[in-house]
């Protein structure tokens, strides 16, 4: 269930009814934005899909742009929370931490395909200050993911780990653009194992260190 974050760009009543309404708005918005794009959807469309009056919707979100940014922040925060879990894990084994990260990424894309697809669309159309803030947070996520790969593969140089990180992201992102006839649990296992093979079996092309 998608219900984060609450950071001032939206109005979010704290009672249970208000939280349920907000969740309905978010779920409807993800689906409609993914289907029709940011500019093909109005707040009124989202309100109707969520079975809420315009007044009820405006209690939570002042504008369509605020709602759209909130969805991007939810997607980003899911990644941030996953990395916090990896770095706070009890195991000191880099391979264990990497598996937790890759498994979490696979689950994120499989459980929230529309949100993942939405996060790759129209981000460049956001106001510059909003886009820069999101990009700074994404940069931290990328750097931490690359660090996990470097810890598991100390023979790689950082740029090689960066390429592998993008390859893993591309593999997992690809699942949001098509529907597979494979059983979901089988697909999940395939994706995790393929992503881990990318990390562990890609040979370093860097000159041998003295």
Image (cartoon, grey):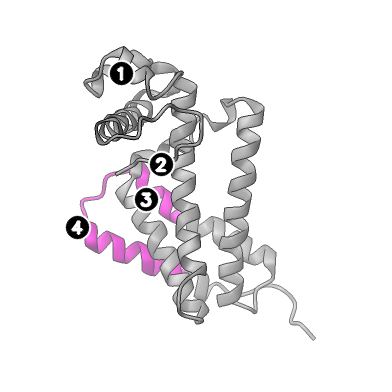
Q: Is 135 above or below relative to 145? A: above
Spatial separation of the CA atoms under disc 4 and disc 3: 15 Å
Q: Is 155 above or below relative to 66? A: below
Estimate how packed mark 2 is, as few (under 14), some (14 to 19) or many (20 or more) residues with alpha carbons within 10 Å. some
Give the residues drawn in magenta, as a range.
171-197
Q: Which residue is mark 1?
A: 56
Spatial separation of the CA atoms under disc 2 and disc 4: 29 Å
Q: Residue at x 63, y 50 (%)?
A: 139
Q: Are marks 4 and 3 in contact (CB under 8 Å)?
A: no
Estimate how packed mark 3 is, as few (under 14), some (14 to 19) or many (20 or more) residues with alpha carbons within 10 Å. many
- The quadrant of the picture occupied by the N terminus is top left
Q: Which residue is mark 3?
A: 109
Q: Is 16 above or below relative to 172? A: above
| Between discs 2 and 3, the one toward the N terminus | 2
Instruction: Where is residue 28? Give x, y as percent.
Output: 29, 28
**Quadrant hosting residue 151:** bottom right
């Amino acid at each position: 269930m998608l219900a984060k974050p609450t950071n001032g760009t939206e109005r979010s009543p704290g009672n249970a009814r208000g939280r349920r309404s907000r969740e309905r708005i978010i779920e409807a918005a993800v689906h409609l934005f993914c289907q029709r794009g940011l500019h093909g959807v109005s707040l009124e469309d989202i309100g109707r899909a969520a079975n809420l009056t315009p007044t009820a919707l405006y209690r939570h979100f002042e504008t369509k742009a605020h709602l759209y940014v909130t969805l991007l922040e939810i997607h980003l925060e899911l990644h941030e929370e996953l990395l916090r879990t990896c770095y706070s894990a009890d195991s000191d084994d880099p391979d264990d931490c990497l598996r937790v990260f890759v498994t979490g990424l696979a689950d994120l894309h499989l459980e929230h395909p529309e949100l993942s697809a939405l996060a790759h669309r129209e981000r460049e159309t956001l106001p510059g200050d909003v886009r820069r803030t999101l990009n700074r947070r994404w940069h931290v996520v990328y750097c931490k993911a690359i660090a996990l790969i470097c810890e598991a593969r100390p023979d790689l140089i950082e740029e090689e780990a960066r390429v592998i990180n993008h390859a893993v992201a591309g593999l997992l992102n690809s699942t949001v653009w098509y529907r597979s006839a494979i059983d979901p649990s089988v697909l999940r296992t395939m994706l995790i194992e393929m992503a881990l093979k990318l990390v562990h079996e890609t040979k370093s092309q860097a000159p041998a260190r003295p």
